[in-house]
Each structure stands twice: as structure tokens, then as C-alpha cells.
Image (cartoon, rainbow, N blue to C red):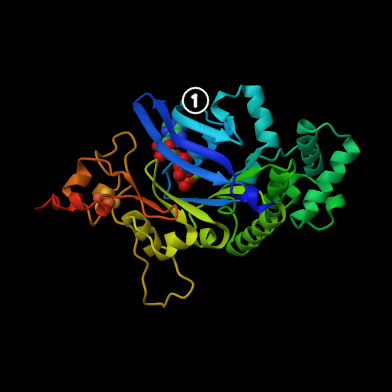
Amino acid sequence: MTNEMKDKKLLEIKDLKVSFFTPVGEVKAVGGISYDLNYGEVMGIVGESGSGKSVEAYAIMGLLQSPGKVVGGSITFDGEDVLAKTSKEMQDFRGNSVSMIFQNPMTCLNPVYTVGNQLIEAVQCHNKVTKAQAKARAVEMLELVGINNPVRRMDQYPHEFSGGMRQRVMIAMGLICDPKMLIADEPTTALDVTIQAQIIELMKDIQKKTQMAIIFITHNLGVVAEVCDRVSVMYAGKIVEQGDVKDIFYHPHHPYTLGLLRSMPRVDAKEYERLIPIEGTPVDMLNPPVGCPFGPRCEHCMKICLRMEPPRIDLGNGHTSACWLLADEAKKEGTPNE
Ligand SMILES: Nc1ncnc2c1ncn2[C@@H]1O[C@H](COP(=O)(O)OP(=O)(O)OP(=O)(O)O)[C@@H](O)[C@H]1O
Ligand code: SF4
Ligand SMILES: [Mg+2]
């Protein structure tokens, strides 16, 4: 890829809002998030369970299920308005432009077809090629993801593969149509630690070879440090901090990001250094707090935080933090107990 391409925007998300209209009320699962992703760039999305990471991904892929609905904002991919696409156009979009790999590969592989047939079908569904050409491509992809004896493995069924090998097949499936962007939603959580590390190495390798853009959703900050160029930290459906991976790890600003970093096991941690979990409970998405969503759990909470949502403040170099601590006038009001 040329440097010129690398500076070109591939994905632009502006003020995206997704709600679930449940019998007990509206759940604002994604409450207005914005970011851009350039060609070939890897964005990590981190945040605790329920923060809206998967819902955001489903919205980009057009895979939201009722009662979930995009209620605001825009998604532009390669200059095209994704939300204006028909369902047929979305199918083409999912096959040719973006792919997604999910947490549990068994939910996406059909147990009654051989792995080869499923890969061949994925190629033929989106490209006008002969069966022999599709088969050659399938074998090539299995080889790329590190599966030995790919020709023989083509005739086997998903249950004949180990968990790690199945996840490799899913990656092959995701890459087979040469997408411009891949969304990987917790692609390794179902695997044991050694296999996780191998899959992460594989994804890094493939990213280098193919130069595709990746949105990498994970709970694991170590994976983010290893794989990503930029990071978005999500809390209660919002991006609370965003920046280059180095800025997020070495100059974190938002109290929630600091909490996440403190709760992360370090490779060099001494035995007596305990991990500090973030205190308090996650937001009740049916009744979110007024003001800053992290307010009730934040040790720096000020009066203004309980009244007004903090703006996203620019710290330079694309680093932003949505926190009142950056606004001098906010501190004048003092803390809730003052
Ligand atoms: N079918 C649904 N009906 C109602 N609310 C839903 C539904 N699916 C998701 N939500 C809401 O959307 C929020 C975000 O869910 P999402 O699956 O995106 O979380 P996540 O960040 O991917 O979490 P995890 O790390 O556990 O995968 C949840 O807190 C939940 O309130
Ligand atoms: S805005 Fe206030 S409550 Fe929210 S993270 Fe910043 S200091 Fe804490
Ligand atoms: Mg999820």
C-alpha cells in the first residue's frame, strides 16, 4: 500500500447512536460515537462487558437484530453511505468490503458441511469464479492461516478441528474475499492462553501481509498493545478516551482508562503487587446517570460531572478524553461533598 493510501479515510463514523426498544424502555446501547479509520489502520476497541462494543460492530455490518435500531448518526465506508444501502447491497458489502470474525467459531461454521465446501461457497457467493478457482483460493487461505495439509483438511467437518484450528478457519473465511476491513470481535476469548497468543501472532502477520484495516474488539489490553495503532476506550455506549496506542498506555487521561490499566495484569508484576479492580457497578443502561456516565464510580467526580455530560476534549495528536478534569472552570464548582 502506498503512503498516500495510508492517510486516506476508509471508515468514518459520526455520532452513531443505536438503541434497543425493549418492553421496559429504550436502552441506548451506543450513545453517539465518532471516529475515523484509515486504510490499513488497526483500531482497538476496549471496555467492560455491556459497553456497546459488539452492538457498534453489528451496526457497521448491518447485522443489528430487532429490537435494535440505528437511531442517529452516519457510517461512511470508502465514500459510500452504509446506512442507505439496501439489504442486497449490504450482503455484497459484507462479502466484498468488510468481514467480521466472531467470538465463537462454532456459531458461524455449519457442522453438516465440510470446511472446504464452506470456504468454496464463500468465494463463489461473492466472485464469478469456477469451482476449481474457488477451491484453489480456499486451499491458499487455509495455508495462509497456518493449517497443515490444507488439501486433506478441506474434506473434513468443523468438529474434526480443534478450537484453535476452527478459529483459524474462521479467519480464513473472513479473509477469503480480500476485504478492505476486518472486524474481529473477541476472536480469541474462547481459546486457551497459548492458542490465543498464536492466533494474535497470526493476525498480526496477516495484517502486515494484506495491509487491511482491522477493528479489534477485546477485553485484553495486552493484545491491544501488541496489535493496534489506535485505541478507543468505551464506557456505557460512549467513547471516553481515544488516541494512539502509545498515548493511551503512557499518557492515559480519563479516570476510567486509568482504572482499566490498573486492573490489567502486567508481565513484570511482582507477587505482592495486587491488581486493583474498578470499584462500583457498571451503568444500568435503562436508567443511565445524568452527566458523566462514569460519575458514580469516579474518584475525581466533581459537582459538574453529576449535572452535565463532559465534552470530548482534544489533547493533540488525535488524543481525546471526555472528562471535565480538563476544563479549568469545571473545578471551580468543587466536589459533590463541598
Ligand atoms: N437484544 C438486546 N436487547 C436489549 N438490549 C440489548 C440487546 N443486545 C444488547 N443490548 C444492550 O446493549 C449493551 C451493549 O451490548 P454489547 O453486546 O455491545 O456489549 P459489549 O461491549 O460487546 O460486551 P461484551 O464485552 O460482554 O461482549 C448491553 O449493555 C445491553 O444493555
Ligand atoms: S467527567 Fe468527572 S466523573 Fe467523569 S470521568 Fe471526568 S472527573 Fe470523573
Ligand atoms: Mg461483545
Answer with the quarter of the image where residue 105 lies.
top right
- Tell me: 308 left or right of 94: left
Judged from the image, the secondary structure of the residue bearing numbered disc 1 is loop
Q: In front here: 179 or 328? A: 328
Q: Position of residue 266 (x, y in %)?
A: 45, 70
Q: Position of residue 254 (x, y in %)?
A: 33, 55
Q: Residues within 10 Å of mark 1 (few under 14, many from 20)?
A: few
Residue at x-position 57% and y-position 31%: 63
Residue 21, visible in the rendered structure: yes
- Furthest toward the front, the residue is 4
Rendered position, 23 above or below 144? above
Residue where numbered disc 1 is placed: 66
Q: In front here: 258 or 191? A: 258
Residue at x-position 24% and y-position 51%: 327
Q: Position of residue 250 (x, y in %)?
A: 42, 66
Q: In front here: 229 or 124? A: 229
Residue at x-position 43% and y-position 74%: 269
Q: Position of residue 297 (x, y in %)?
A: 27, 51
Badge count: 1
Residue at x-position 67% and y-position 37%: 97
Q: Amino acid at mark 1?
A: Ser
